Image (cartoon, rainbow, N blue to C red):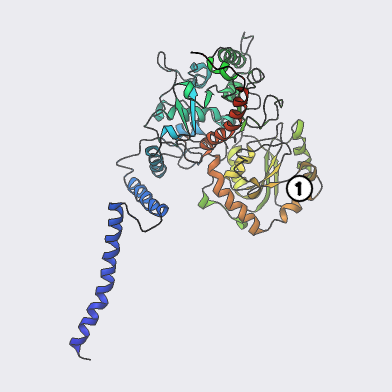
Amino acid sequence: MSEKSRLPSRFLFFLIPISMFFFIISSVSLLQLGNISLLPGSVFKLILLNSTAVYLKSNVKSEPVKIPFFSSMASQIDTKASMRSGGVKCPNSEMAAIGKQKRENCDHNRALLRVYMYDLPPDFHFGLLAWKGKANQTWPNVDDLNHIPLYPGGLNLQHSIEYWLTLDLLASSTPKVARPCSAVRVQNSSQADIIFVPFFSSLSYNRHSKLHGKEKVSVNKMLQDRLVQFLMGQHEWKRYGGRDHLIVAHHPNSMIDARKKLGSAMFILADFGRYLLEIANLGKDIIAPYKHVVRTIPSGKSAQFDERPILVFFQGAIYRKDGGVIRQELYYLLRDEKNVHFTFGTVRGNGINKASHGMASSKFCLNIAGDTPSSNRLFDAIVSHCVPVIISDDIELPFEDVLDYSKFSVFVRASDAVKKGYLLNLLRSIERDKWTMMWERLKDIAPQFEYQYPSQPGDAVDMIWKAVSRKRSSVQFTLNRKKRYRRPEIH
């Protein structure tokens, strides 16, 4: 073949790939401009979301995201934010972008829950955090990070649920804060599905249950008495006898003076350990997760099976009363076993950091009943991706109507756990593949146990509102039955 005849072939050889390249570029441009996609919708949205996130990330220094973002994932911790949420990372542009997208698509008329919140005086909520607003100001400005009162750290945080839910409702009234649309605040109680009582009962118990100076009645008891008096006088309470009211009493000793009088309301609790059945039960109440106190392990940095040298981990109070005596029995059974870490521990002496490191280095973490059936340790284990071993026969678990805990936890009856050799033989029989399946599931569900502000889709705050929505149907069933023979109101 002559040299001239080879030229068209060479030309075509280079022309074809160049043409294909320009064809692909032009196709993508047309798809974005015309909002037409040959790809599945979810994939196309992901492309757009990622390009938005990249844009935001590349402009962080010149155009910082103004939406405050709190998370329990403790990396690059800001001191002020850390005090507020117990381990918080700095504003995250990608999460802010997701939040903005949710806000734009949020129709308040389609929210799962319309919530009316009483404008109780600050004495009942943020005033307990030493917040003082201006004259006649009931609530802090929640669209500005610097105006949100700090929540005390340490173990106080584990029962801070009332704080996060109240902030979330306040945020639903301002377009400046991006959040999901599961619950929105309404100003007219007749339009509400639920009446929320913003009393920081756990903080009140932790900080104000002891007598000081010449006090004859503690501040905690005084606030409960005032709350009962207030609620009993409200039209909203009288309408259904309080059955559509939502009260957070997460600390086992919170609301101890008022709970019997307010027992018709829906409670958000840690467990039912210190409640009579007629006051608190699964028929009307919500079990919410503790706020974990150890740092969250990022999914990509979670140690795998062979990278966790400790087989079983427990660190905490060992000598407990009531159902917690099993801790002492297990301590004597396990303390000298190989690859077992079973020791006394507190938050003092860098205790939280030690526990965080220990759980992240362990395959299994024991969650043993204490003075009550539940403990914060379960949620510390979940965010450490350490497979929980639940030894608490009477425990009730958060969101169990939508979460199958058996896929990421091991349940052991207390009577079996105290048999010599039983527990360790059981855990050693769980092979790498089975453990890895549970570990992968832990990484998937861990975000559902994060409390943060602003709340994010599928986090603990969002999950609680959805649980209240599901529970509301059974409450509404009871209310509707009681209306059967009620005479219609004549206007």
Residue 315 seen in the figure: yes
Q: Which residue is mark 1?
A: 336
Q: Is residue 282 left or right of residue 302?
A: right
Residue 211 picture location, percent across and down? 63, 14
- Look at 49% across and 22% down and name the residue there: 117
Front residue (pair 80, 485): 485
| Residue 183 location (% of width, % of height) | 48, 32
Instruction: Pinpoint residue 210: horizontal percent, then vertical percent.
Output: 63, 17
Using the rendered view, name the quadrant where residue 264 is placed. Answer: top right
Q: Where residue 315 sits in the image (x, y, percent)?
A: 67, 40
* Tag 1 secondary structure: loop
Q: Is residue 82 above or below residue 41?
A: above
- Between 202 and 357, the residue placed more toward the observer is 202
Q: Is residue 460 above or below residue 431?
A: above
**Mark 1 neighbour class, 10 Å CA radius: few under 14, some 14 to 19, many 20 or more:** few
Residue at (71%, 49%) from the top-left corner?
340
Q: Nearer the viewer, residue 424 or 43?
A: 43
* Residue most extreme to the right: 420
Would residue 52 be found to the left or right of residue 154 on screen?
Answer: left
- State the residue lying farthest toward the left: 4
Q: Answer with left or right where residue 305 lies relative to residue 94.
A: right
Q: Is residue 426 left or right of residue 77?
A: right
Report the number of numbered marks: 1
Question: Residue drawn at (24%, 77%), measured in percent from left and top?
Answer: 12
Q: Which quadrant of the figure contains the N terminus?
A: bottom left
Q: Is residue 249 visible?
A: no
- Residue 281, by quadrant, is top right
| Three-letter code for the amino acid on which mark 1 is drawn | Asp
Q: Nearer the viewer, residue 352 or 159?
A: 159
